[in-house]
């Protein structure tokens, strides 16, 4: 990933106060840590030139130094075991996309560099009326839902204007703020002060291993919306109470209409894949006779030259996928969490 020669943002005015034209899913927060302390390597990993970061000694999050580009912050100069840490707020994520940079490539490079995500937020913006807040309130009140969460709460928020504080509505939280998975649902139009708009936001906040696993799925599938919906499906369902046994109750029609699918994604850490072993076994099974034939036919010197040229040509054609296989090759089992 080469550094982008882009101009720094002139100002940070936050998210635009306009609703999306259609339903969409976006990455709305990212935090990750890499094990190395050379901040120049972090800029290279991000794909942003160091020229566009301003540096100060105030630091934060236990680090002595912070480097800022808009709402993207790189923290450095911590203890040797802290490496460097990167935080992107929602606005920072939009700035990253405006620079033409790619999430899948970034997640792959973080993995290759033995980094790990500390937080990943996925937001679904719903503007077609398919996620009615009054239906959510009614089903919660009547306990017409199935969920893995043990905690649920509602918080009233305010925003400040020239005329004083104004209510920005209620946020429904599923899970606790310390949970590895947390859902937030709220009226985004009201929060942004946009009158006469139907804009509901469903936010999925993932931490640590679950953020890592979600990033792996994003790299493999490149379909953020379906991944977000599958995570929701695994955690919570709003139902019609047609049976005393909730497991037999059907999904509420409005909920099915919102999700469009029943696919479920359980965030399971798949460690230690024997990927190099698989490649080696495939080579032996399919091409061992051909390789032996070349050795016999070319002789020792000719075969060495052939293999040297083969490896040189192959190295030039290696992609991020091949380096990721090298990085991930060990012996693990699936560990649910």
Image: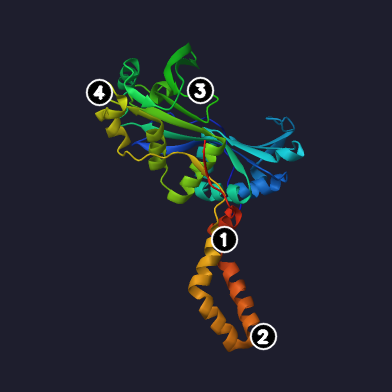
Residue with the mark numbered 1: 276
The mark nearer the N terminus, 1 or 3, is: 3
Percent from the top left, x then y, of residue 189?
Answer: 39, 24
Q: CA distance from mark 1 to mark 3?
A: 40 Å
Q: Under tag 4, what secondary structure?
A: loop
- Label placed on residue 301: 2
- N-term-proximal mark, 3 vs 4: 3
Residue beneath the point at 62% across and 82% down: 303
Q: Nearer the viewer, mark 3 or mark 4?
A: 4
Q: Which residue is mark 4?
A: 243
Task: Give neighbour class at mark 4: few <14, some 14-19, many 20+ (Cα, 10 Å).
Answer: few
Closer mark to the observer between disc 1 and disc 3: 1
Residue carrying label 3: 176
Helix, strand or loop status at disc 1 = helix
Q: Residues within 10 Å of mark 2 (few under 14, many from 20)?
A: few
- Which corner quadrant holds the N terminus? bottom right
**Separation of disc 2 and disc 4 at Cα?**
77 Å
Q: Nearer the viewer, residue 229 or 326?
A: 326
Query: Residue 201, image x and y in percent?
Result: 40, 28
């Amino acid at each position: 990933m080469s550094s982008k020669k882009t101009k720094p943002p002139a100002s940070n005015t936050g998210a635009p106060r306009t609703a999306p034209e259609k339903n969409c899913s976006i990455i709305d927060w990212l935090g990750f840590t890499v094990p190395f302390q050379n901040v120049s390597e972090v800029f290279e990993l991000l794909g942003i030139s160091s020229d566009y970061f301003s540096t100060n000694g105030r630091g934060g999050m236990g680090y002595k130094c912070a480097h800022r580009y808009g709402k993207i912050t790189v923290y450095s100069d911590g203890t040797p075991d802290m490496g460097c840490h990167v935080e992107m707020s929602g606005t920072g994520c939009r700035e990253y996309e405006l620079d033409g940079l790619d999430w899948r490539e970034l997640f792959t490079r973080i993995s290759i560099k033995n980094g790990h995500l500390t937080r990943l937020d996925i937001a679904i913006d719903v503007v077609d009326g398919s996620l009615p807040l009054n239906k959510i309130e009614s089903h919660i009140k009547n306990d017409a839902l199935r969920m893995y969460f043990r905690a649920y709460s509602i918080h009233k928020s305010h925003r400040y204007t020239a005329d004083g504080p104004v209510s920005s509505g209620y946020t429904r939280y599923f899970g606790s703020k310390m949970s590895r998975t947390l859902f937030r649902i709220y009226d985004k139009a009201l929060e942004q002060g946009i009158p006469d708009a139907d804009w509901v936001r469903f936010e999925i906040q993932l931490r640590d291993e679950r953020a890592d696993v979600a990033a792996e799925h994003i790299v493999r599938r490149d379909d953020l919306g379906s991944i977000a919906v599958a995570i929701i499906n695994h955690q919570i369902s709003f139902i019609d109470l047609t049976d005393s046994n909730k497991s037999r109750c059907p999904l509420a029609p409005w909920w099915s209409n919102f999700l469009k699918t029943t696919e479920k994604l359980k965030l399971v850490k798949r460690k230690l894949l024997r990927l190099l072993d698989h490649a080696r076994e495939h080579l032996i099974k399919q091409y061992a006779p051909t390789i032996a034939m070349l050795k016999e036919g070319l002789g020792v010197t000719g075969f060495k030259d052939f293999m040297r040229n083969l490896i040189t040509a192959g190295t030039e054609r290696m992609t991020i996928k091949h380096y990721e296989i090298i990085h991930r090759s060990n012996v693990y089992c699936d560990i649910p969490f």
